[in-house]
Image (spheres, rainbow, N blue to C red):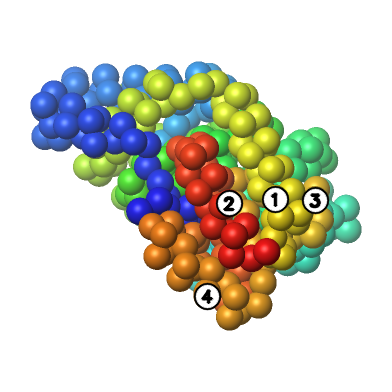
Amino acid sequence: MISFYPGPSRVYKQIPAYVKDAYEEGILSINHRSKEFIELCSATQNILRKRLNIPADYMIFFTSSATECWEIIAQSFPETYTYHFYNGSFGEKWLRYTQKLKQNVVGYQFNYENLLDFTGFDLSGEEGIICLTQNETSNGTQLPIEDIKLLRSTYPDHLIAVDATSSLGGLNLPIDQADIWFASVQKCFGLPAGMGIMICSAKTMKKVLSINEKSYYNSMVFMREMMKDYQTTYTPNVLSIYLLLRTQENCKSIKKVDAKLEKRAAKWYKFLEEKTDLKPLIKNKKIRSKTVIAVKHEKSKIAEIKDKAKAEGIIVGNGYGQWKNETFRIANFPAIKKKEIKLLKNLLKNDIK
Ligand SMILES: *Cc1c(COP(=O)(O)O)cnc(C)c1O
């Protein structure tokens, strides 16, 4: 089966070999307090730092998922205002989870065909955390990098938290322009599901220490205390950390990966518009995602295409949330191969026109 699902998604083809290596090297059974683990953890952080341009004063944490990162942020900042800008299901879920856990949570929904216009909001008088979804996996929209930069310069004292679950590892994101970034590994990192990555600025950690919230195993105060020594607050997914190290060692520079994805995405959108009677869900070219392409047609046609693809050994992603039945989604993640894209394009082309 060839998977275009935007998570869990196609894993790198070297994964079985790396798992075998992990078994043979004894990685699968190492103790998470051992010197071997500390070396693995620090090597993995070093490679991430280098590959993703993570500044030296940012801390990197391993969590169990992106969803857990939503919870960690909510619980570690119990009184702090959080401002959630969202246009789709994942951004909204983050808001709803946070609302269940704490007070002072404000949601701003914006139309998914529009750029995020935050000029109408005055957040300047207060501190708080601005919560953004860089790539909204449910509808295939993306927050342009310039907007994150603009938010950074407009609100220098706020913390900016970015859910980059379906873009970190694929796009060249400006890590220094926000305070908290997080993702899980089953999307652009091309790994099996089961781990999250959270990256936090020095400003974030300073605030965490001043609040000093310590009620949970994953309170950021504890996470920091442990990760200073490349340790975790619980027994971590050592295999996933190892696979992250091995796959990232082999990746091209993030600039090159980003350029490749951008080119592929442009080709996908052009293909859909010119060679099929399918349409990209998103009309506004400025916000079309480079990593998740949402494709629209009538409900019956969408179901038919999904079935046909499946019969050919190709899985496309189901629609999500309000777009469940009238769209399907195509992951444009780094691990996907050119020849696989060609197969899917052939199928869509033959069937539709
Ligand atoms: C997939 C996804 C999540 C959830 O990831 P989990 O690993 O299931 O926690 C959160 N946010 C976005 C934008 C996603 O694409």
Query: Could you say which is closer to the camera, residue 149 or residue 143?
Result: 143
Query: Could you say which is closer to the camera, residue 227 or residue 51?
Result: 51
**Picture quarter with the C terminus:** bottom right
Report how far apart the C-alphas of labels 4 and 3 lie in the structure. 26 Å
Whichever of callouts 1 and 3 sits on the residue coming sooner in the sequence is: 1
Report how far apart the C-alphas of labels 2 and 4 lie in the structure. 17 Å
Whichever of callouts 2 and 1 sits on the residue coming sooner in the sequence is: 1
Structural crowding at the residue carrying mark 2, measured as other residues with C-alpha within 10 Å and reported as few (<14), some (14–19) or many (≥20):
some
Whichever of callouts 3 and 2 sits on the residue coming sooner in the sequence is: 3
Residue identifier under label 1: 271
Query: Where does the image place residue 151, in percent across and percent down from the top left?
Result: 78, 42
Name the amino acid type tagged 1.
Phe
Q: Is residue 72 left or right of residue 246?
A: right
Report how far apart the C-alphas of labels 3 and 2 lie in the structure. 21 Å
Whichever of callouts 4 and 3 sits on the residue coming sooner in the sequence is: 3
Q: Secondary structure at mark 4?
A: helix
Q: Could you say which disc has been placed on residue 303 in the image?
A: 4
Query: Where does the image place residue 191, in percent across and percent down from the top left?
Result: 36, 41
Which one is closest to the eye, mark 2 or mark 4? Answer: 2
Q: Secondary structure at mark 2?
A: helix
Q: Residue at x 19, y 20 (%)?
A: 35
Query: Could you say which is closer to the camera, residue 344 or residue 281?
Result: 344
- Seen from this angle, which residue lies furthest right? 120
In the picture shown, does residue 273 fall above or below 54?
below
